[in-house]
Image (cartoon, rainbow, N blue to C red):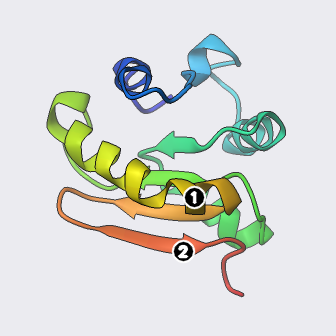
Amino acid sequence: MNMSPQWSEVFAKYGWESVHWASVGDPRATDRVIMAWAQVNGYVVFTHDLDFGSILAATQAESPSVIQVRAQDILPERLEGVIVDALHQFESILESGALIVVDEVRYRVRILPLNR
């Protein structure tokens, strides 16, 4: 819920299927509900919220993958290039389970489950 629905348009432009949570679930849903939905439906969680990485660490989950954006300006016009580059670079890792933290200049990748 904390990312603009415009991101779905960006992902579609590059051939990636995506949905904004507001179109499939209750906007008041907990992060755990969103994570469970993403896991069951085979989606990656794209977020600005630090709680999703914390959930992965606390539960030792092997999925879903999470891309966590760490920047002040999280709009597509500012970050499209860096996000698309990360998705291309780490696509196979995301398919097998990862937490990828992206900021304006770098990526940090952790394979799931965390704390191996």
Most extreme residue toward the right, as rendered? 40
Apparent side of residue 13 relative to residue 29 in the rendered image (left or right): left
Apparent side of residue 59 relative to residue 79 in the rendered image (left or right): right
Q: Quadrant of residue 14?
A: top left
Mark 2, residue position: 110
Residue 49 in the image: above or below residue 12: below
Q: Position of residue 64 (x, y in %)?
A: 70, 51
Q: What amino acid is labelled 2 in the image?
A: Arg
Most extreme residue toward the top, as rendered? 23
| Crowd class of label 2 (few under 14; some 14 to 19; many from 20; radius 10 Å) | some
Task: Please tell me which residue is depicted at 38% across the width and 26% down the height of the picture.
Answer: 7
Q: Nearer the viewer, residue 38 or 25?
A: 38
Q: Nearer the viewer, residue 23 or 90?
A: 90
Task: Please tell me which residue is depicted at 47% across the width and 71% down the height of the picture.
Answer: 109
- 1 or 2: tag closer to the N-terminus: 1
Say which element carries label 1. helix
Q: Quadrant of the C terminus?
A: bottom right
| Crowd class of label 1 (few under 14; some 14 to 19; many from 20; radius 10 Å) | few
Task: Please tell me which residue is depicted at 47% across the width and 43% down the height of the picture.
Answer: 47
Residue 81 in the image: above or below residue 62: above
Can you see residue 106?
yes
Mark 1, residue position: 92
Most extreme residue toward the bottom, as rendered? 116
Q: Position of residue 43 (x, y in %)?
A: 67, 38
Q: Position of residue 34 (x, y in %)?
A: 70, 36
Say which element carries label 2. strand
Alpha carbon separation for disc pair 1 and 2? 13 Å
**Nearer to us: label 1 or label 2:** 1
Q: What amino acid is labelled 1 in the image?
A: Ser
Can you see residue 51?
no
Task: Please tell me which residue is depicted at 77% across the width and 65% down the height of the picture.
Answer: 62
